[in-house]
Amino acid sequence: MPTRAWPGFAFGAAWGFAIFALSLPLGGHVEPWDGLPGYYPIALVLGGLLAGIFLRARPLPLWLGLMVGKVFYVCVCSSRGPGNLWPIGLAFDAVASLLALVGFWVGVWLARRMVA
């Protein structure tokens, strides 16, 4: 992985882990999409927005980091484990995580506007 990709990957992994780790305390459900309405999409867009503004990272490592952080939490830290429907959850999560890229591009646009 190129040197410029590591900050985005690391941030994405930490953010993805935090989304799942905070889902139960904040929303009352293990899966963030089952918790508070809007928690999951807002968290994804906010993470992408922060990465776009402050890291100027690349989008693909950010998305991969999000996926790695979430999978790590579910497989290693969750008391329930991945469960029987993990392929469906992983596919859903991969598509839903594209919202982070929307936030990322908005963040890049805002950062460019603030500098100019």
Image (cartoon, rainbow, N blue to C red):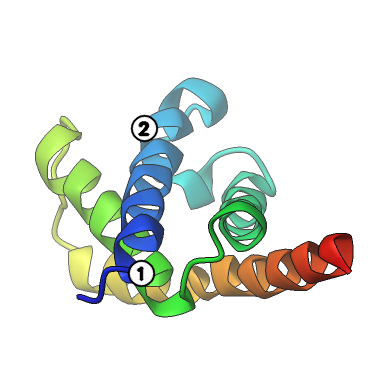
* SS at circle 2: helix
Q: Is residue 70 above or below residue 24?
A: below
Q: Quadrant of residue 94?
A: bottom left
Q: Which residue is mark 1?
A: 4
Q: Residue 11 location in percent, x, y? A: 40, 50
The crowding category of the residue bearing disc 2, from other C-alpha atoms within 10 Å (few below 14, some 14 to 19, many at least 20), is: some
Q: Is residue 18 above or below residue 103?
A: above
At a point 30% along the width and 52% down the height, the residue shown is 70
Q: Is residue 110 left or right of residue 96?
A: right
Q: Quadrant of residue 9?
A: bottom left
| Contact? badges 2 and 1 (CB < 8 Å) | no
Q: Nearer the viewer, residue 107 or 116?
A: 116
Q: Quadrant of residue 116?
A: bottom right
Q: Residue 14 location in percent, x, y? A: 35, 43
Residue found at the far top of this picture: 25
Q: Is residue 86 above or below residue 33?
A: below
Q: Which residue is mark 2?
A: 21
